[in-house]
């Protein structure tokens, strides 16, 4: 195999891996309604026996987003939904970012999904 | 002929009636009525009064904070907690026990704490022990466990209104107190602001 071919194969493999990884990450986020809010980053870490999710949201619109709500769904290692938080209202002013921190209160929770619901602009 | 038409009428009526009874299909009664089930955890903004969303978000926030406190997270054994009164210092009726009961359910499910019977159900515990204990072992009634901590708190509100806007601010604060030393080992609060414009229905 020539050197160019090897480089091309590595690049292709890298791209496929990245694609698969980003695909996995986007499965954790569902945005319902207007796409005026972006989940720009989300990560978890262990806090004692529980997992904590840190989610960065951004309003990429010129108007503030009002009446937008979010909730977290907590799953165990078998993918069984163990608990859902209440829908929580939040306001993001124009072009601003906010950070949400939520902690599961069940010890067997291992993963989570963020659901964001944004109303249509009036 | 008359007999035949009578049988036909009865059969038709029976079919129609049975049809009415099964509107909506199996397992459903009154499907066409105005009553519908909704999402119990949906954000509710029917009025600016303290509502289900405030109750749920308060309980979730304060439970998370309590579980993070070192007196619970770093305890060698799950501490024993007794709920005491959360005072409603607002001008509206708020069932403060609903807040503490919700927090208790969440904390018990976490497995990080143990709860002792509170004032409301301690009488029931005494009654049960009176029923089951013989006269010779009634001394055991004194063996009710001491709590490591008690939970107390307050709900306050500030309301302001002008011709166009009504603003309501709620503050729910809870404290974890050691009854032995009287030390407040943890305290946190949940703040809620609700703004209603005059054009909205409800005030």
Image (cartoon, coloured by chain):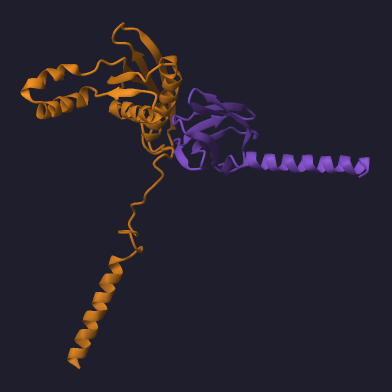
Chain colours: A purple, B orange
Q: Which of A88 and A80 is in front in this view?
A: A80
Q: Which part of the image, by quadrant, shows the N terminus of chain B?
A: bottom left
Quadrant of res B21: bottom left
List the single residue furthest toward the left: B135
- Tell me if residue B28 comes above or below residue B174 in the rendering: below
Residue shown at 51%/31% (left/top)?
Answer: A90
Residue B165 falls left or right of residue A34 = left
Residue shown at 33%/27% (left/top)?
Answer: B104
Q: Which part of the image, by quadrant, shows the C terminus of chain B?
A: top left
Residue shown at 31%/7% (left/top)?
Answer: B182
Residue B25 image point, x, y percent:
35, 64
Residue A44 falls left or right of residue A88 = right
Residue B70 falls left or right of residue A56 = left
List the single residue furthest toward the top: B181
| Residue A56 shows in the view | no
- Tell me if residue B75 comes above or below residue B6 in the rendering: above
Quadrant of res A31: top right
Residue B72 falls left or right of residue A22 = left
Residue shown at 38%/18% (left/top)?
Answer: B77
List the single residue furthest toward the front: B136
């Amino acid at each position: 195999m020539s050197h160019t071919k090897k480089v091309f194969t590595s690049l292709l493999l890298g791209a496929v891996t990245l694609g698969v990884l980003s695909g996995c990450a986007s499965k954790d986020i569902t945005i319902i309604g207007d796409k005026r809010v972006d989940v720009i980053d989300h990560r978890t870490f262990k806090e004692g026996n529980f997992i904590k999710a840190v989610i960065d949201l951004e309003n990429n619109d010129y108007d503030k987003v009002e009446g937008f709500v979010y909730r977290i769904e907590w799953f165990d290692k078998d993918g069984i939904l163990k608990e859902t938080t209440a829908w929580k209202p939040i306001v993001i002013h124009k072009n601003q970012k906010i950070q949400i921190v939520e902690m599961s209160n069940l010890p067997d929770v291992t993963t989570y999904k963020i659901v964001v619901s944004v109303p249509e602009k009036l | 002929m008359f007999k035949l038409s009578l049988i036909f009428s009865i059969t038709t009526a029976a079919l129609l009636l049975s049809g009415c009874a099964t509107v909506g299909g199996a397992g459903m009664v009154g499907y066409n009525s105005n009553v519908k089930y909704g999402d119990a955890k949906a954000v509710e903004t029917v009025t600016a009064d303290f509502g289900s969303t405030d109750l749920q978000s308060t309980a979730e926030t304060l439970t998370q904070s309590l579980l993070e406190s070192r007196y619970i997270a770093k305890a060698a054994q799950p501490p024993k907690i007794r709920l005491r009164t959360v005072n409603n210092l607002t001008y509206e009726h708020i069932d403060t026990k609903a807040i503490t009961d919700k927090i208790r359910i969440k904390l018990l499910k976490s497995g990080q704490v143990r709860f002792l019977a509170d004032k409301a159900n301690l009488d029931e515990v005494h009654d049960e022990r009176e029923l089951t204990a013989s006269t010779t072992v009634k001394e055991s009634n004194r063996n009710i466990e001491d709590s490591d901590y008690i939970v107390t708190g307050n709900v306050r509100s500030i309301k302001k209104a002008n011709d166009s806007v009504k603003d309501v601010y709620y503050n729910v604060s809870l404290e974890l107190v050691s009854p032995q030393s009287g030390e407040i080992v943890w305290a946190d609060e949940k703040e809620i602001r609700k703004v209603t414009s005059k054009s909205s229905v409800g005030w």
